[in-house]
Image (cartoon, rainbow, N blue to C red):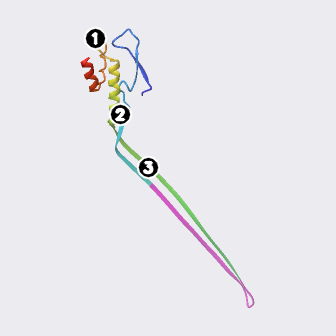
């Protein structure tokens, strides 16, 4: 906002060239907001399944002599996992005052700008008031009075 310049007519000299001002020097401030209320909602669903299968078979062959046995076994296990999630964030904002230091700085900038070149004046013929002289040490004032 300080880099953005606008041209405004000089009210004390309407036929003269326009004056350039930054938005900040004209009193435009950035907006400030404060969080009044915040709500966070989180939903999660997690599921896990385990499936186990076991199977087996056995067979025996033989007679009065040697005996043969056959065993067949199988084992399987399956795992399944799924998840779902959703969230929601709700925030309520409200305008807030600017920081105190920024506000004081802007008032000082505006006052300095108006002291140098008043934008509004009742009489276009009137010269701007001179800025006050800086105070001098007491010793110098006494010497000037004696002279």
Which residue is at a point 60% across and 72% down the rendered structure image?
Answer: 54
Relative depth, front residue between 54 and 128: 128
* Dot label at residue 28: none
Real-space Cα separation, disc 3 to disc 1, in angstroms: 64 Å
Q: Quadrant of residue 121?
A: top left
Query: Residue 4, position in %: x, y?
Result: 44, 25
For disc 3, the neighbor class at 10 Å (few under 14, some 14 to 19, many from 20) is few
In the displayed structure image, the side of residue 93 where residue 46 appears, left or right: right
Real-space Cα separation, disc 3 to disc 2, in angstroms: 37 Å
The answer to whether residue 87 is above or below residue 106 is: below
Which residue is at a point 30% across and 21% down the rendered structure image?
Answer: 133
What range is drawn magenta here? Answer: 44-68
Residue furthest bottom as drawn: 64
- SS class of the residue under badge 3? strand
Q: Label 1: which residue?
A: 123
Main secondary structure type of the part rendered in magenta: strand
Q: Label 2: which residue?
A: 102
Depth check, mark 3 against mark 1: the one in front is 1
For disc 2, the neighbor class at 10 Å (few under 14, some 14 to 19, many from 20) is few
In the displayed structure image, the side of residue 76 where residue 41 appears, left or right: left
For the N terminus, give its image quadrant: top left
Depth check, mark 3 against mark 2: the one in front is 2
Q: Label 3: which residue?
A: 87
Q: Quadrant of residue 93?
A: top left
């Amino acid at each position: 906002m300080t880099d953005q310049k606008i041209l405004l007519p000089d009210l004390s000299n309407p036929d003269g060239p326009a004056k350039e001002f930054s938005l900040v020097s004209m009193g435009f401030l950035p907006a400030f907001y404060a969080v009044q209320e915040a709500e966070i909602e989180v939903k999660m669903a997690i599921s896990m399944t385990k499936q186990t299968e076991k199977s087996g078979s056995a067979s025996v062959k033989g007679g009065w002599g040697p005996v043969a046995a056959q065993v067949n076994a199988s084992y399987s296990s399956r795992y399944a996992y799924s998840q779902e999630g959703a969230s929601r964030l709700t925030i309520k904002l409200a305008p807030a005052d600017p920081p105190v230091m920024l506000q004081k700085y802007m008032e000082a900038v505006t006052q300095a700008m108006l002291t140098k070149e008043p934008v509004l004046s009742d009489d276009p013929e009137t010269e701007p008031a001179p800025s006050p002289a800086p105070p001098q040490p007491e010793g110098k004032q006494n010497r000037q009075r004696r002279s």
